[in-house]
Amino acid sequence: MKTFTTAELLDNLEVGQKAEMISPVTDVVVERTVYGIIVRKDAMSTKHIGQNLPLSPTVLRATWRLERKLISFDRAITHLRKGEKVVCEYDGQIVTYDSLDDIIFIAEAIDGKWYLEQ
């Protein structure tokens, strides 16, 4: 899975999506809300939980992993039309789709969990 710098995190994290710091500290989880990027879990201190993410030196040099955001099948098709990759999780298997030329099974379209590839 792709990792992001803090600057890239600020640009890519969508409302309702979470991200986890993977370096230099682990166990720091943030979530974008309509009010900003809020700290949900902090291994370093509890004083920031529920507050906006502080841009400390540790945070500024951090790398992050974004949580995959669930999207609808319709939105997955829209992303495929734009040339973006999507992922479908169905029946214990994970399949990455690159274009509309790939075969998508009806069961995946109806019951699959679709994600935008990060």
Image: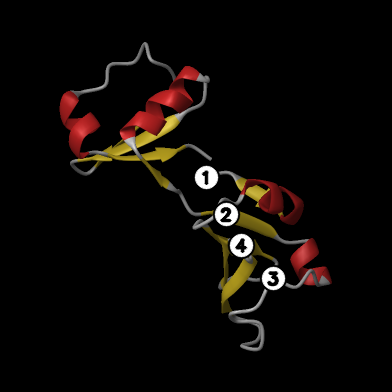
The secondary element bearing badge 1 is classed as: loop
- The local crowd at label 1, few if under 14, some if 14 to 19, many if 20 or more residues have their Cα within 10 Å, is few
Picture coordinates of residue 83 (x, y %)? 52, 19
Q: Residues within 10 Å of mark 3 (few under 14, many from 20)?
A: some
Callouts 2 and 1 close, C-beta under 8 Å: yes
Badge 4 amino acid: Ile
Q: Amino acid at mark 3?
A: Leu
Task: Reply above or below: 109 against 23.
Answer: above
Mark 1 vs mark 4, CA separation in Å: 12 Å
Residue underneath mark 4:
22
Residue 53: x percent and y percent? Answer: 69, 71
Residue, disc 2: 65
State yes or no: discs 2 and 4 in contact (Cβ < 8 Å): yes
Q: CA distance from mark 3 to mark 2?
A: 16 Å
**Mark 1 and mark 3: span between their CA atoms?**
23 Å
Q: Is residue 3 visible?
A: yes
Circle 3 is placed at which residue position? Answer: 53
